[in-house]
Image: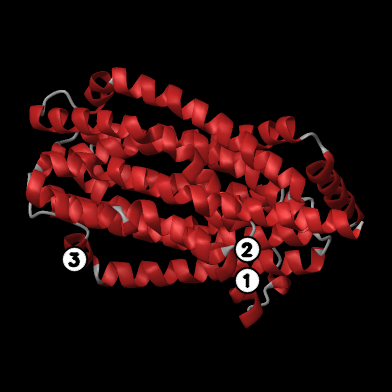
Amino acid sequence: MTDKKTKQEEKYKYLTQANIEPLIVKMAIPTIISMLTTSFYNMADTFFVSKINTQSTAAVGIVFSMMAIIQAIGFFFGHGSGNYISIKLGAKDTLEASKMAATGFLSAMIVGFIILIFGIIFINPLAHILGSTNTILPYSKTYMKYILIGAPYMTASIVLNNQLRLQGNALFAMIGLISGAIINIILDPIFIFYFDMGIKGAAIGTIISQFISFCVLLIGSNVWGTLPIRLKDFSPSLEKYKAIIVGGLPSLCRQSISSFSTAFLNTSASFFGDAAIAAMSIVNRVSMFANSAIIGFGQGFQPVCGFNYGAKKYDRVIKAFYFCVKVSTIVLIIFAFIIFINSHYIVNLFNKEDEALFSVANRALRYQALTLPLWGLITLSSMILQTTRKTIRASILALAKQGIFFIPIVYILPKFLGLFGIEIAQPLADLFTFIISIPLGYSIIREMKIELKNNTKVT
C-alpha cells in the first residue's frame, strides 16, 4: 500500500509540475501508438474481408454500427469513471478514486452482458435497421453474432484502458491495446483464408484478440496500475452514477450517434447499390486512421488536463490546450495532403476489381481529405470540455459532427444530388462542427482565465 501511495505521489508531482510540452509529448506517444495500432487493425479487418467479396466489405461497415454501440458503453463508463478518477487523484482523494475504478469496470461488464442477450435475440431486425440489403444480410448476421459474444469484455477492456490512461499510466494502456491488435492482424488471414472461414473467421479473430487485450489490461491494472480493481470497492450509488454520467455522457453521445449516423449512411447509400455501402465503409476506415493519431494526442492531453484542473492549476491546462491544437492541426494538414494525392492508391489496396466501388471511394476520400485539418480543434475542444466536466457543452459538440449536422445532411442531400450527396455529407458536417467548436471550446478557456484573475486578486 505504501508503494501504491508513493507511486500516486510521484504521478501527481509529475503531472502537475513537469514542463507542459515535453509532458504532453511523453504522455501522448503511447496513446498515439495505441490509437494508430487499433485503427490499423480495423483497416486490416476491412482489407482482409475485402478479398472475399463486396458484400463482406459492406457487412463489416454495417456491423460497425453495432460495434459503435458496444464501444459507446465502454467509453461512457471508461471516460465517466476515468475523468472522475483523474480529478480525485489531482485532489489527492485516493479512496474515492478506487471506489470509482471498481464501479465503472463492473457496471460496464453488466451492461455488456445485457447487450449480448438482447442483440442475439433481435439480430434479424437489427441487421435490417443498420442498413443490410438482402444480399448483404447473411454476411452481416454472421459477423454481428460473434461481435455480440464479445460485448461484455469489449466494454470492460475499454473502461480499463481509459482508467489506466487517465491515471497517467498511458504506457500500459498502450500495451493492452497493442497486444490485442497484433493478435487480430495475425489471426484474420489464418481464419479467413487458411481455414476458409470467410467473414466468420474475421469476426472470431476479432473477439479472440479483444479478449486477450482485456486480460492484459486487467492484469496490468491490478499489478502495475495505481488503482487495482477490487470487488470490495464496487460501490454502486446514485452519486457514483451521476458522476459517471457527467464525465461520460459526451462519449456516449459521440459513440452512439456514430452508430446511428453509420446506419443512416448505409441506408442512404443502399439506394445506389452494395458498392456504394462498401465504398463508404472503406472511406470511414481510412479517415478514422488519420483521425486516430489526433485522438491519441488528445488522450495524452486528458490526464494532464484532469490532474491540473483538479489541482486548480488552470494556467497549465490552457497552455496544454493551445499546444495540442497547434500540433494536431499541423499533423492533420500533412495527413490531408498525403491522402488527397494518393487516394487512388489507397482505395486500390482494398479493391481493384469493382470499378463502381473504386469510383465512389476515390471521390469521397478526396472530399474528406479537404476537411481533415479541421478535426484538431474539434477533437481537443471536445476533450477539454469533457475532462473539465462541462457536460452540456461537451455533449453538444459530441453530437454535432455525426448527429446534429451529419444525419440531416446524409438524409436530405442524396435526394437532390444523388451519390454526390453521400460523398460530401461528412465533409460538410465537419465544416459546420468546426464553426461551433470555436465558441464552445474557448468558453472553458475564458472561464479558467477569469478564475486565474480572481485567484491573483485574492493573493
Q: Are marks 1 and 2 in contact (CB under 8 Å)?
A: yes
**Which residue: 26% across, 28% down?**
366
Who's the residue at 81% across and 59% down the image?
A: 454
Image quarter hosting the C terminus:
bottom right
Q: Position of residue 33 (x, y in %)?
A: 55, 32
Where does label 2 land, which residue?
81
- Quarter-of-image position of residue 160: bottom right
Numbered tag placed on residue 147 in the rendering: none
Asked whether the beta carbons under mark 1 and mark 3 sit within 8 Å of each other, the answer is: no
First in sequence: mark 1 vs mark 3: 3
- The image position of residue 397, as x and y in percent, is 45, 56
**Which three-letter amino acid code belongs to the residue tagged 3?**
Asn
In the shown orientation, is residue 336 left or right of residue 216?
left
Q: Nearer the viewer, mark 1 or mark 3?
A: 1
Considering only vertical position in the picture, is 367 above or below 392?
above
User: Quadrant where the N terminus lies?
Assistant: bottom right
Q: Position of residue 272 (x, y in %)?
A: 7, 44
Q: Amino acid at mark 1?
A: Ala
What's the CA distance linking mark 1 and mark 3? 36 Å
Q: Which callout, 3 or 2, points to the residue nearer the camera?
A: 2
Q: Is residue 175 in view?
A: no
Q: Is residue 2 visible?
A: yes
Residue annotated with mark 3: 124
Residue drawn at x 29%, y 67% as measured from the top left: 120
SS for dot 1: helix
Q: Compare residues 170 and 141 and report the one nearer the observer.
A: 170
The amino acid marked with disc number 2 is Ser
Please give the residue where the numbered disc 1 appears in the rendered image: 243
